[in-house]
Image (cartoon, rainbow, N blue to C red):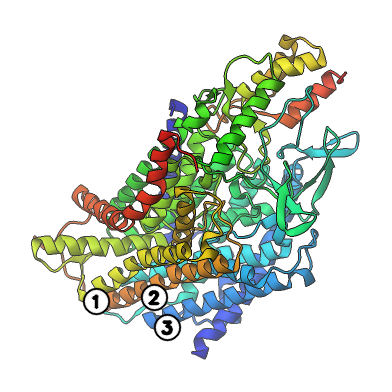
Amino acid sequence: MNAAGILQIVVYFAVLTAGAIPLGAYMARVYSAERTWLDPVLKPIERIIYKVCFIKPDQEQHWTAYAFSCLMFSVVGLLVMYAVMRLQALLPLNPASQVAVAPDLAFNTAASFATNTNWQNYGGESTMSYLTQMLGMTVKNFTSAATGMAVLVALVRGFARRQVKTVGNFYVDSVRSILYVLLPLAIVVTLALVWQGMPQSFDAYTEATTLEGAKQVIAQGPVASQVAIKHLGTNGGGFFNANSAHPFENPTAFSNLIEMAGELLISAGLVFAFGRMIGDRRQARALYLAMSTMLVIGIGVCYWAEAAGNPLVQAMGVDVAASDLAPGGNMEGKEVRFGIANSAIFAAATTGTSTGAVNAMHDSFTPIGGMVPLVNIMLGEVIFGGVGCGLHGMIVFVIIAVFIAGLMVGRTPEYLGKKMESKEVKLAVLCILIFPLSILGFGAVAMALPAGLAGMSAAGPHGLTEVLYAYSSATGNNGSAFAGLSGNTLFYNTTLAAAMLIGRFLIIVPTLAIAGSLAAKKIVPPSAGTFPTHGMLFIGLLIAVIVVIGGLTFFPVLALGPIVEHLALAAGTLF
Amino acid sequence: MIKQIVPSILLTLVLTVVLGLGYPLAMTAVAGSLFPHQAHGSLIERDGHVVGSELIAQGFSKAEYFHPRPSATTDTDPNDSTKTVPAPYNAANSGASNAAPTSKTYIEGTQALVDQLKAENPHARGQVPVDLVTSSGSGLDPHVSPAAIEYQLPRVAAARKISEDDLRALVAVHTEGRSLGFLGEGRVNVLRLNLALDERWQPK
């Protein structure tokens, strides 16, 4: 760890916060249907879309109709994407002559993109045509992100409204998320990324003759337009197999900063939008601080572990000290232009949010460095989390935290003036149970079956971590991987797809039920007995609840995976 | 029910056209006119032929060239399409080793890389730079660290029969510091440096 590395972490947070606050104010206006400066351009387009799609923007929905629309929209999108992949060989814009994607892989990939997971059991440049990347990946990157944002907005309305039956209109919230937030940002980011060196063309793969006379086929394509929304929408599915480690998908340290900031920008902005929509910005500040604290700890631990390097490699007389002339540390699976600090920030940011893009290979991280992204996912994808999903996941933890605080003082818990009663707490617990049930359940099945064991590339504790990471990533809708796992098999394609769908929709439905239940409640004014939820005490309690729930549930299996591997590495034991 | 399903289908179709065709095509047109070199893959031509992309590593094994980082990319096995075979610097199938830090194969392989590097660079000074014995995340990392260039410099100078100081002066021109002084890491683009080498001193 050195001063330059720490400065980069500080700059990252400064850029992020400076962008998130004004974006939050803007998004609050978007979701309250107030005038924005983009109205003159976008309002007419918005009206046409409603008209063509038979959407009645003034008709609000009960939470059940909202949830049903959300499910339908996701299912239709999943089917369209599946069809595009299956038919790509017959469709245009396929210069590399990619064949139809196999049914199980196509199902896995469609489920993956419909749930904002973007797990890659495929190598983009060797499997998907340009048209698939556009009609499939790019479109789902927008729509799955917008779905998450819409669900959050419904939940926030649950808090802001009193005694009403409706939570908003799903289609309006989704269309406004895309038109007013995602698309304008994606256009700006696309151009910035091309400027930094990212390809954006329909050229066929180029054949070059290298200086030493070898043939090299260079894959490219309409990369930047996909990658921009891949980060902004916390999607993470790469155009290329190597994702954001690929020099075409992340050409410079500056493009890396754009991508890392893009991953958190909307999620962080939504926290501030939440504060404005409920009319209490102190609450937003508290959640922002809680999320930032956990993110900083993750970055710090990962940076420290990776900068220390692999002791066995160091023992071969390899220099792992960082300087202006050398990145040092553990460089296996990392790129020189990013070095250690930017790989650690990226790893923590991409897993704290549910992005799942990678600029370095988590599978080759040191045991403790690789445990950070795994734990970030296990904690529930609430360290900013996916766009929308992160904050609604965090609010679920808040409900649990105020419930526990209420138990301690013997009062009915309340949050933002809404009483948290048995129904809300039960639904919140349901959301939280999904993670351990899916991760440990599927993990145990994979460990028990030959088809599961066959996927591991590493022997010893690292193999367990690969499998555990896969189901955590799928359930958390993250999409990053310990990519040594051979996931493109019938077993993993189907079980991972199931974990993604469970992790997405079994959380969205109870969350919307909470939204509906809250919207129907009256708001009680705070009294002397109300537990304040904007102070340091509450921030501490909230973090403790998240860590205890995540920690207690997963600690035994972490002890068998990364922790025992760390001890083995220190003792020089190999597998 | 139907009331909810119809908008789902129509909205999916409308958005597929707007976001799946309109947005990427418009971006391609705008980006192509603003940044044509980057938009088409930052290709480098020499004598009218494409020799590579400045962002994509290519293999170098001759002594008179600087070598890039090891690459773990693969290609489909020509004899069995369900298997892969090592194919370093395969720019049509990026990828990493994904080796575990406690893998016996990985540690033994790294030891072999260290031994080979030392054998190729008998006059190198100092310890082995870590980036030269670890494969990159993409398998296509176009850069190595300045330390990795310095490590190989005596070999390249000897192979080209030029003075180390002359070569060091050329390297300095191609060494990039951290962007804006603090972002990323110091680095040297291997392909661009090797092209400059060829331009200045024809290989003998």
What residue do we see at 25% from left, 64% from top? Answer: A399
Callout 1: chain: A
Q: Against A371, is A396 above or below?
A: below
Residue beneath label 1, please?
Answer: A423
Q: Against B139, is B124 above or below?
A: above
Between label 1 and label 3, give the one nearer the viewer: 1
What residue do we see at 41% from left, 34% from top? Answer: A570
Which x, y percent locates residue B70? 67, 35
Amino acid carrying mark 2 in the image: Val
Which x, y percent locates residue B23? 66, 61
| The label number, if any, that marks residue B141 in the structure image | none
Marks 2,1: beta carbons within 8 A:
no
Given the current orientation, which residue lies at the most extreme right position?
A: B47
Residue A17 figure quarter: top left
Q: CA distance from mark 2 to mark 1?
A: 14 Å
Callout 3: chain: A
- Neighbourhood count class around disc 2 (C-alpha, 10 Å): few under 14, some 14–19, many 20 upward: many
Looking at marks 2 and 1 on the same chain, the residue that comes earlier in the sequence is marked by: 1
Which x, y percent locates residue A431? 34, 69
- Looking at the image, which is closer to me, A290 or A474? A474
Callout 2: chain: A
Question: In the rendered view of the protein, which quadrant contains the C terminus of chain B?
Answer: top right
Residue beneath label 3, please?
Answer: A65
Amino acid carrying mark 3 in the image: Ala
Residue beneath label 2, please?
Answer: A509
For residue A161, say whether it is visible.
no
- Neighbourhood count class around disc 1 (C-alpha, 10 Å): few under 14, some 14–19, many 20 upward: few
Which x, y percent locates residue A297? 35, 42
Query: Which element type, helix, strand or loop, lies under badge 1?
Result: helix
Looking at marks 3 and 2 on the same chain, the residue that comes earlier in the sequence is marked by: 3
Q: CA distance from mark 1 to mark 3?
A: 19 Å
